[in-house]
Amino acid sequence: MERDVVISGMGVILPNCDSRETLWRQLRDGRSQLSLIPDPADPARTVPAGRIEGFRPGDYLREVPERLYARYGRELQLYLASLVLARDDAGIQAGDLVPEGVGLFDGTSRGPLEFWYDKFRQEVGRPADQVYSRRDIVSGLNGECPGIAASLFGFKGPTVAIAGSCVASSLAIGYAAREICSGEIDVAFATGHDAALLPALYSMYRDAGLLSQETQDPGRALRPYGNAPTLVFGEGAVTLVLEERERAERRGARTLARVRGMKHGNGGSHPTALDAEAERSVRILESLLGAADVDRERIGFVVGHGNGVPISGMAEMNFMRRVFGERATRVPLLSTKPYYGHLLGGADALSIAAAALMLQHGHIIPALNAEAGLRANGWQSFGGEASDCGMGLTFSYGMGGQQAAMLLERCP
């Protein structure tokens, strides 16, 4: 990268969490925020989920007229709230920003699916003109979150929405960093979000045999790197503020981590099946490390996909062995999904936020619920300890064969 890019702020709206400090405490202490909720597809039963309870957009969007945000869908409200929190966490004042130099980048998987699902349900037995209005053209448009945010806050740089399945927010954050690196913009708000805890989602994934069967202890529901499917869905929004490093230092900003690069690609073989040998994953990771001219010995941890699906867990452990060699089992392989559930398009933003916080605090979070599966596969390190590591990786998979990796470095 030509210009150094740093993360200088973080806004999170997650289950039982709406601040960077709370996020770090929950991750550091290994406290899952999953709960049991009525199954959206079958209310007679309960399922574990990362559901945000009691969210009130007005608590965060005080500068936005209520008549506007009240008609937005839940995913858009979560997105906007995380953006405001990130701006404030970065200590950015109105005078700090040149509107043309600010970009908005967003990654999502399901987008306004819940918005339209609710609309279609309202349509049953009612005339269409009593259900739909011209306002739905904007608030229900897929990928419109950055555009609406730009209009509300007066940002005039690029507004980019990426629907890249579960790697969407890696792409959003990576492309935001590239725009800063190239000098096109100076500041970016890069987000990952999704809110789609819907009956159809649960029906499809249950039919595929992928959902967790836990009904007693939600904190144990999602178990990465084991041999049984334990997928648990969540919802939320995570926004990172990216800045050119010298600019951030001039205004006295706290920097959480340096973004060293992002690489992505496709498996090119099947839209859902993964290559358990991880051939493409290894090439992506080696390309990322090579482009950054980084010795893999410097990598202190990997925040993996860790979604509780055995085939992806097997692929991750295999790329770890091939990339790190004999050192692989001593590098903690972590997942944020046992903490808050699988956020779909928002999952990578959470993983990258967790990696940045680990580098900032010099502490590796516990490999929550993963130790048994990892130990059975030869792992010797499971996090939950202080560390002087200077670099970390994130890696994820997405439907359609997509794969993405991000490299972060501790700031001086």
Image (spheres, grey):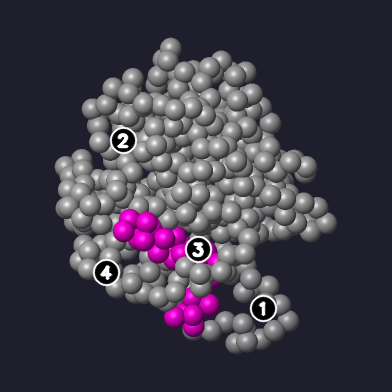
Whichever of callouts 3 and 1 sits on the residue coming sooner in the sequence is: 3
Residue 123 is labelled as: 1
Residue 94 is labelled as: 4
Q: Nearer the viewer, mark 1 or mark 4?
A: 4
Near-viewer residue (41 or 270)? 41
Magenta highlight range: 65-91
- Give the residue at x 45% y 22%: 331
Disc 4 is placed on an element classified as helix
Q: Residue furthest right?
A: 44
Q: Residues within 10 Å of mark 4 (few under 14, many from 20)?
A: few
What's the amino acid at mark 4? Ala
At which x and y percent is residue 180?
22, 51
Q: CA distance from mark 3 to mark 4?
A: 22 Å
* Location of residue 284 (image quadrant): top left
Disc 2 is placed on an element classified as loop
Whichever of callouts 2 and 1 sits on the residue coming sooner in the sequence is: 1
Residue 68 magenta: yes
Residue position marked by numbered label 3 in the rendering: 78
Near-viewer residue (101 or 248)? 248
Q: CA distance from mark 2 to mark 1?
A: 52 Å
At which x and y percent is residue 139?
48, 74
Whichever of callouts 2 and 3 sits on the residue coming sooner in the sequence is: 3
Q: CA distance from mark 2 to mark 3?
A: 29 Å
Residue position marked by numbered label 2 in the rendering: 410
Quadrant including the N terminus: top left
